[in-house]
Image (tube, rainbow, N blue to C red):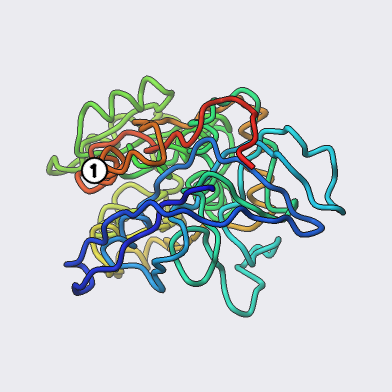
């Protein structure tokens, strides 16, 4: 019988509780007419999985497998699904309810993300999964299973923030990406470099800044240093001495800093607020005609476009660390510890199965 990782319910208040991981036996799925049966070979963590374990994310479930990112091999297809999927390596679309609208999810019930909640009954921390054939993309062949599993959620989030929302995804533009080392920030940097933009990064860790430079970033600054925006200005091209857009996942004092480095009419795209759930908007930002744009994951169309770009540019998502074995709960817990400490550079991945195409059904 297939197995899955879920959360175990224990008593505790939101933010103080930490739900243990539990390995459960689950029923073998039966495909509907348009479904695919996929043996999961690798699945990746995201911050939402840590928030779920702390009860800081809506509608936690103790029955639905965790994780939204997955890579696997199609082992069976439904009666009306294309037989061409059989044996193919695929990555799963990490959300449901958003087809192609540029504004947001079309579904009246909102956007549902895979993994660990009552709003979507699918999760990738399991041996076998059943999904509609329209909810997968063929995995880019230049990626390893771990790299492919690392792409979906953060890749989609980063693509929408940079390409769909910033209005500055053009060769030669200057973009500042905060908090380099996280999955979304790294994907944004890789997309920016692939487009031909000048990518600059911030981090509180000099080693992470150096790694980003080795991957193509033009420069970087330590946000723990007073007046880091002055150092950033020194690094900008003389013929374009300003930042066109900031892609930010932290919040905090980003607007105060933005008024000093962004061009008039520049854009801040906000996909997260890890520093604080609130931040200030200043009159200086108004006088500089700055724009603040919220951004979430993205549509099915954006996912397809993102995967095509990764294929074309042969981009490889950065994997920080891999733990092998779905039943290796103690080691899997250490991946969550990495996320708590913020020590990772790239995605944290579970290798569910080896690279063989053999079915477990």
* Res 162 visible: no
Residue 269, quarter of picture: bottom left
Side (left or right) of 42 relative to 135: left
Assign the C terminus to one quadrant of the image: top right
Foreground residue, 346 or 237? 346
- Counting from the top left corner in percent of width and height, residue 252 is at 24, 60
Q: Position of residue 122 (x, y in %)?
A: 55, 59
Left or right of 187? Residue 276 is: left
The reply, left or right, for residue 340 in relation to residue 166 is left
Q: Residues within 10 Å of mark 1 (few under 14, many from 20)?
A: few
**Looking at the image, is 120 positioned above or below residue 5?**
below
Residue at 39 percent across and 31 percent down: it is 324
* Residue drawn where x is 49% and y is 60% of the image: 296
Which residue bears the numbered disc 1?
Answer: 342
Residue 158 visible in this rendered orientation of the protein:
yes
How many numbered discs sit on the rendered protein? 1
Residue projecting furthest to the front: 1
Residue nearest the viewer, comparing 281 with 64: 64
């Amino acid at each position: 019988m297939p197995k899955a990782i879920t959360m175990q319910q224990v008593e505790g208040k939101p933010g103080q509780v930490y739900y243990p991981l539990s390995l459960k036996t689950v029923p073998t799925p039966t495909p509907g007419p348009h479904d695919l049966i996929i043996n999961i070979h690798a699945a990746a963590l995201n911050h939402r999985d840590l928030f779920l374990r702390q009860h800081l994310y809506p509608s936690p479930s103790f029955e639905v497998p965790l994780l939204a990112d997955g890579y696997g091999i199609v082992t069976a297809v439904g009666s009306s699904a294309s037989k061409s999927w059989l044996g193919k390596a695929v990555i799963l679309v990490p959300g449901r309810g958003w087809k192609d609208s540029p504004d947001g999810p079309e579904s009246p019930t909102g956007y549902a993300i895979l993994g660990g909640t009552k709003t979507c009954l699918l999760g990738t921390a399991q041996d076998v999964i059943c999904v509609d054939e329209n909810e997968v993309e063929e995995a880019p062949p230049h990626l390893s299973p771990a790299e492919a599993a690392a792409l979906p959620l953060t890749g989609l989030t980063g693509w929408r923030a940079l390409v769909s929302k910033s209005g500055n995804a053009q060769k030669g533009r200057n973009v500042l990406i905060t908090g380099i080392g996280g999955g979304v920030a790294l994907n944004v940097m890789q997309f920016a470099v692939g487009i031909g933009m000048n990518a600059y990064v911030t981090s509180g860790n000099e080693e992470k800044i150096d790694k980003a430079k080795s991957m193509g970033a033009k420069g970087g600054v330590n946000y723990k240093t007073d007046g880091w925006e002055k150092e950033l200005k020194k690094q900008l091209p003389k013929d374009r001495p300003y930042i066109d857009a900031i892609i930010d996942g932290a919040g905090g004092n980003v607007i105060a800093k933005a008024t000093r480095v962004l061009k008039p009419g520049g854009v801040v795209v906000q996909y997260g607020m890890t520093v604080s759930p609130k931040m200030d908007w200043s009159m200086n930002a108004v006088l500089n005609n700055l724009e603040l744009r919220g951004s979430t994951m993205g549509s099915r169309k954006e996912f397809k476009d993102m995967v095509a770009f990764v294929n074309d540019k042969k981009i490889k998502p950065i994997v920080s660390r891999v733990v092998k074995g779905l039943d290796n709960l103690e080691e899997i817990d250490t991946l969550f510890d990495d996320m708590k400490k913020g020590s990772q550079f790239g995605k944290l991945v579970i290798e569910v199965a080896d690279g063989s195409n053999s079915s477990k059904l």
